[in-house]
Amino acid sequence: MDARVAYGFHHLRNEKPNLAQGPLSNKLIYSGYSCTQGWFVTPCTSDPSLRGLKNILRMHVKKVNCTEWEQIPVPKSVRAIVALNLHNYGSGRNPWGSPKRQYLEKKGFVEAHVDDGLLEIFGLKHGWHASFVMVELISAKHIAQAAAIRLEVRSGEWKDTYMQMDGEPWKQPMSKEYSTFVEIKRVPFQSLMVNGL
């Protein structure tokens, strides 16, 4: 849902740059998109099963030093999946939080560090949940820690889905016949931006 809101905002800003001229107008526009896209008030109130990702998304992870993919259930309340390799999300927030050692052990997690080679995978339930996570009153819904993640999105009646990476949203086309796969993993090289001379 957050990627859909971000895509709508970026699309509007590109089409009508005079509307988004400063932080206050940007926040108002973004808030408007958040409310109209179902992030706060879902249009699926008649059928609660349509609200979450569970019906359209399968998630597999590879644990550290494992070669096999393990399917991880998507909690039925989750409407957005986020995978981080840093503590920061959304302007420096730490949605993973600082879970207690007992909780980490119970869930099979380790303390998150930027250089541990792990992705912290968590979910956001709706706009209010995301808002409380962003002001760090609560932490996000912890789902997994892994070296790699593979998302399988099944479209059904949807023509596309919205995704976001490093703050850049895009509309991912979907096929009715085939699933769309997105894999996030560590690679042995870094990408570089080169400034033309």
Image (cartoon, grey):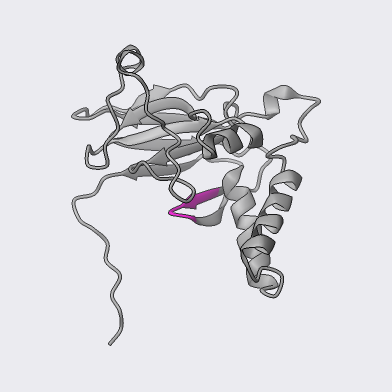
Judge by depth and name the residue closer to the eye, 71 or 20: 20
Q: How many marks?
A: 0
On screen, residue 179 above or below 47: below
Furthest-bottom residue in this view = 197
On screen, residue 122 above or below 182: above
Q: Main secondary structure of the magenta part?
A: strand
Of the 4 image quadrants, the one containing the N terminus is: top right
36 in magenta: no
Judge by depth and name the residue closer to the eye, 142 or 159: 142
On screen, residue 19 above or below 28: below
Residue at (47, 36) in percent of width and height: 152
Query: Which segment is the magenta one?
Result: 163-167
Would residue 196 be visible to someone looking at this image? yes
Q: Position of residue 73 (x, y in %)?
A: 47, 21
On screen, residue 37 above or below 127: below
Looking at the image, residue 180 sits to the left or right of residue 2; the answer is left
Furthest-right residue in this view = 46
| The image quarter in which residue 27 lies | bottom right
Residue at (69, 50) in percent of width and height: 31
Q: Position of residue 34 (x, y in %)?
A: 69, 46
Residue at (68, 65) in percent of width and height: 12
Looking at the image, residue 147 sits to the left or right of residue 28; the answer is left
Would residue 161 be visible to someone looking at this image? no
Judge by depth and name the residue closer to the eye, 116 or 98: 98
Of the 4 image quadrants, the one containing the C terminus is: bottom left
165 in magenta: yes
Residue at (65, 37) in percent of width and height: 127
Q: Position of residue 16 (x, y in %)?
A: 70, 72
| The image quarter in which residue 40 lies | top right
Looking at the image, residue 146 sits to the left or right of residue 52; the answer is left
Q: Position of residue 124 (x, y in %)?
A: 55, 33
